[in-house]
Amino acid sequence: MERLTISLNNQLAKQFDAVMHKRGYFNRSEAMRDLIRDLLDTAHSEDHAEGHCIATLSYIYSHHESELASSLTAVQHDHHDLTLSTMHVHMDHDNCLEVTVLSGTIKNVKDFANHIIATRGVRHGRLHLLPIEIEQEQYSPDSVLHVHSAALA
Ligand code: NI
């Protein structure tokens, strides 16, 4: 394990501690590790658009717009290779919340998410993307491929 020492001015350190405690971190190291993991995942997904990822896409829309609901379902069927599962929650009288779990190349998942988020009537769209490494092993020529995946760090 490497030890890093970082210098922060007093104000930045105070603000960091305040947010850290509010978020439930007990020490700076764990908070810093999560920040670094976030940064590495973001950098990785920018550099490896053809790499794989697992992701959740969440968004809200009005259930009174019935054409919107069916067009969102149609887009998901068009990309059934990317969409693993979708959970639909009837939030209140007017609004639906959907959370879709996606898996595929970073580029395809981002394109799909941007398409949904940009759809008229879709609000508060957010993609949370986690790059993963996929290894494929084939034990004998006629056996099925075994796929192993792992989060990066
Ligand atoms: Ni609903």
Image (cartoon, rainbow, N blue to C red):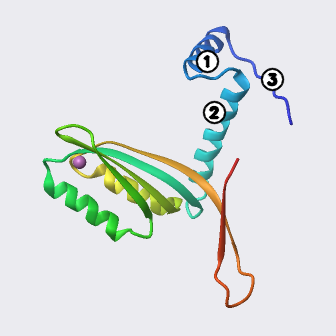
Residue occupying image coordinates x 32% and y 54%: 116
Q: Is residue 57 left or right of residue 5?
A: left
Instruction: Tell me the element at label 3.
Output: loop
Residue occupying image coordinates x 71% and y 21%: 27
Compared to residue 110, the image places residue 30 above or below, namely: above
Front-lying residue, 10 or 142: 142
Q: Earlier in the sequence, mark 2 or mark 3?
A: 3
Q: Which mark is residue 16?
A: 1
The percent position of residue 93, horizontal first and vertical second, equals: 17, 38
Q: Is residue 2 left or right of residue 149?
A: right
Does the residue at mark 3 contact the one at mark 1 (Cβ under 8 Å)?
no
Q: Amino acid at mark 1?
A: Phe
Q: Which mark is residue 35?
A: 2
Instruction: Tell me the element at label 2.
Output: helix
Q: Is residue 45 left or right of residue 84?
A: right
The percent position of residue 11, horizontal first and vertical second, equals: 61, 9
Q: Quadrant of residue 92?
A: top left
